[in-house]
Image (cartoon, rainbow, N blue to C red):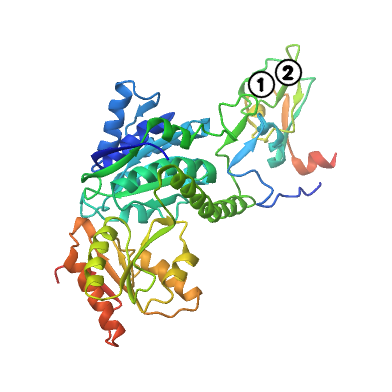
Amino acid sequence: MAKTNIAAITGNEAMAEAMRQINPDVVAAYPITPATEIVQIFASCVADGLVDTEFVPVESEHSAMSACIGASAAGGRTMTSTSSQGLALMAEMLYIAAGLRLPIVLADVNRALSSPINIHCDHSDTMMVRDSGWIQIFSENAQEAYDNMVQAVKIAETASLPVIVTTDGFIISHGMERVELIDDKEVKDFVGQKKLGHYLLNLEKPITVGALDLQDYYFEHRRQLAEAMKESKAIILDIAKEFKAKTGRSYGLFEVYNLEDAECAILAMGSTAGTTKVVVDALRAKGIKAGLLKPRVFRPFPKEEIANAIKNIKAVAVLDRSDSLNGHEGPLCAEVKAALFDKGINKGVLNYIYGLGGREIGLEDIGSVYKDLGELINGKKKDKITYLGVRE
Amino acid sequence: MAIEKKKGWKELPKSDVIEGGGTAKEFKTGDWRSERPVHIPEKCVHCLTCWIYCPDSAVIVKDGKMVGFDYDYCKGCGICAHECPVKGKAIKMVSEKEAKRK
């Protein structure tokens, strides 16, 4: 197993460290709170000659993704980072990166989308681009942020799809935690050399990238993209296996915590899952069969697998740290309900929209959700959607 | 005209990539025309003004003399005929229908 170095670092530092060890060919980026540090720290590595990366400071996030697309299409291993409005500004380019099947890795520090302007954590930014064709991997803590970045490079290049790795803004990005780092050499071995397929710098086999498709070809190309997203599920699991062999740390499409015999369960992504684990422990100590399912991979959505994991749970609550404003429920809840429906499971799923704009969610709040689930099991009628923590 | 058999999504190269260089040449944009320029050699003074102005490089010049049009790529914009300085014009625009009938 790979040698481990233990460090007390923040989520941003962990992601920057992963980038240093990966030593990508190109990083083109623009700063935005709370992601700025990732590339700022990396830029110091560039200045100190610790990496060979061609670092391109651009004038906007749109330019950052455009430059990344050019670099990746040319054949370079390319990474970047952003958040919220920055992700929104590069949105058109995100769709292009995915359509061109470029294995770019982007560290997104989840931050609320304006308006109102808010620099704190919620998942609205990555939710905004959930249809873009990027693989989305959510991190619960700094350890996962680091591990996910290392795996992401390999996932992207194997699936030929770009990957977003998230952390919760400020909560994880700026929170110092105990992180086990892998040796430089081990990371290098793990990610390996970028396998070049089609690339613009190949003068022997010239190509055109980004051509026009009329009504007769666009659909076929997009069908390929859908297939690639489907196939990426198995790739993500394979790479997690390889990662486990190297580090001993297990990753899957989601994580279950005390779910096997649970009667009530919460589904939550990101750092809130970590808080939920503490609540689950406390409830279990009292003899309450509480559990947690923490989706790690949001795109592709592990529909079958999640439905199977929760099919026997009596009452389920889905926590959404973003609202998709469809008038009924948040995005994660909608996906979970669809998954259950397709399995013929008609379970009353309760939705909780929480934590928007960095609104705190604590042990009591999560405790109240489990209390609601308990009441639901006892036949009490519960609201289908609750805005948890908002002042009425 | 043969109907091109179009590839399905499984056969196409993955992603929006077109393999090979200089592939624009295979796209015969000449079939977009609705009228075409016809050269009148007797009137032509070989000033090559039409060659300079043609936006599609569709005027064929050999040994410094204007010899005709590349109808594979000429889109029939009519700039050559418009710019021809010869009195009475050495280039006439003729409808595609009529030209094809000949």
Image quadrant assignment for residue A59: top left
Apparent side of residue A61 relative to residue A371 in the rendered image (left or right):
right
Q: Which residue is mark 1?
A: B51
Task: Name which of mark 1 and mark 2 comes first in the sequence.
Answer: 1
Quarter in which the C terminus of chain A is drawn: bottom left
Apparent side of residue A32 relative to residue A310 in the rendered image (left or right):
left
Coordinates of residue B70 in the picture (x, y in percent): 74, 28
Coordinates of residue A342 in the picture (x, y in percent): 50, 74
Q: Which residue is mark 2?
A: B61
Task: Work out which residue is located at the far bottom of the displayed protein and give it.
Answer: A379
Near-viewer residue (A221 or A347)? A347
Coordinates of residue A329 in the picture (x, y in percent): 33, 70
Image quadrant assignment for residue B38: top right
Residue at point 67%, 36% (across, down): B75
Per the image, label 1 sits on a secondary structure element best described as: helix
Q: Is residue A298 visible?
A: yes
Using the image, name the chain to which the residue with label 1 belongs. B
Near-viewer residue (A97 or A2)? A2
- Tag 1 and tag 2, C-beta contact below 8 Å: yes
